[in-house]
Amino acid sequence: MPPRQRLSPAERRAQLLAVAARMFAAQPYDEVRMEGVAERAGVSRTLLYQHFPSKRDLFAALYRQAAGQLLARSRVDPADTLVAQLTEGLDAHIAYFAENRNTVLAANRVLAGDRLIQTIIADELDALRERLLAVLPYAEGRREAVSGVLKSWLVFVQVLCVDWLTEETCTRTELREVCIGAVLGGLRPLLDEDPAPEWPR
């Protein structure tokens, strides 16, 4: 075990999450052991359990952190085109999925029945939906219809990307463009103004 560094509680928590992020990305969820995380971090198991009472709690904290980071990278700027914003957000998510395949599969497959993990995923999708609603040109009385399309589209993207991790049947660019084309096709009938005139129908 490496010599333990003196860190504040917040610094120690951040260090443990960083170590856990690497381990969950490198190994399937069932193969990650709390003892291994403690050893890699250079701390005792007792200290690790003081911060995270279980592996599930550690994973949940890690996935919540990742969701927040992805939200930060999914900007919504009314001054930019919708396609540019969708491209940036999707590229960030697809890159994270590809670089953290085991982590994403754990959240969406292994822990698919875990209420806390699924709440983290649902909260991120809801935040993304609200951001998109804020910039789309829908008419009065159409918010619920547009919101429903976005909610269904975000679930579609999630499922499609997780399936892509299992078997890469297309390139990242093709995956992204399928996702963009799907949301534009769903939104155009509901909007008075084409949200992406530069994108072919």
Image: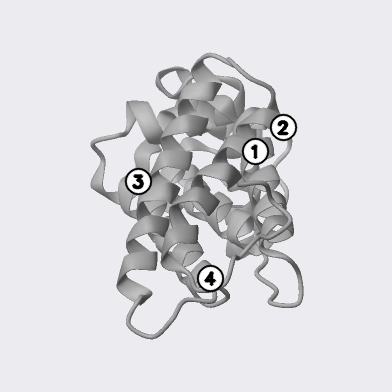
Quadrant for residue 72, please give it: bottom right
Please determine whether, in this image, residue 177 is positioned above or below residue 14: above
Disc 3 element: helix
Residue at the spot x=64%, y=38% of the render? 176
Q: Earlier in the sequence, mark 1 or mark 3?
A: 3
User: Which residue is denoted by mark 2 in the rendering?
Assistant: 173
Label 4 or label 2, whichever lies nearer to me, is 2
Q: Which residue is mark 3?
A: 117
Q: Residues within 10 Å of mark 1 (few under 14, many from 20)?
A: some
- Residue holding disc 1: 177
Tell which of 162 and 117 is nearer to you: 162
Marks 4/2: CA–CA distance: 23 Å
Q: Earlier in the sequence, mark 4 or mark 1?
A: 4
Which residue lies at the image location 69% right of the left edge and 77% below the top edge? 78
Q: Quadrant for residue 112, please give it.
A: top left
Q: CA distance from mark 3 to mark 2?
A: 28 Å
Of the two numbered discs 1 and 3 in the rendering, the one whose residue sits closer to the viewer:
1
Q: Amino acid at mark 4?
A: Arg
Task: Say which quarter of the image contains residue 126.
Answer: bottom left
* Sooner in the amino-acid sequence: mark 4 or mark 3: 3
Mark 4 or 1, closer to the camera: 1
Rounded to the nearest angstrom, the CA distance separating label 2 from label 1 is 6 Å
Q: Nearer the viewer, residue 112 or 167?
A: 167
**Badge 4 element:** helix
Classify residue 71 as left or right of residue 187. right
Give the total number of marks visible in the rendering. Answer: 4
Q: According to the image, label 4 marks what residue?
A: 131
Whether pointer 2 and pointer 1 mark residues with C-beta atoms closer than 8 Å, the reply is: yes
**In this rendering, the label closer to the viewer, 3 or 2:** 2
Check disc 2 and report its element: helix, strand or loop: helix
Q: Residues within 10 Å of mark 2 (few under 14, many from 20)?
A: few
Q: Secondary structure at mark 1?
A: helix
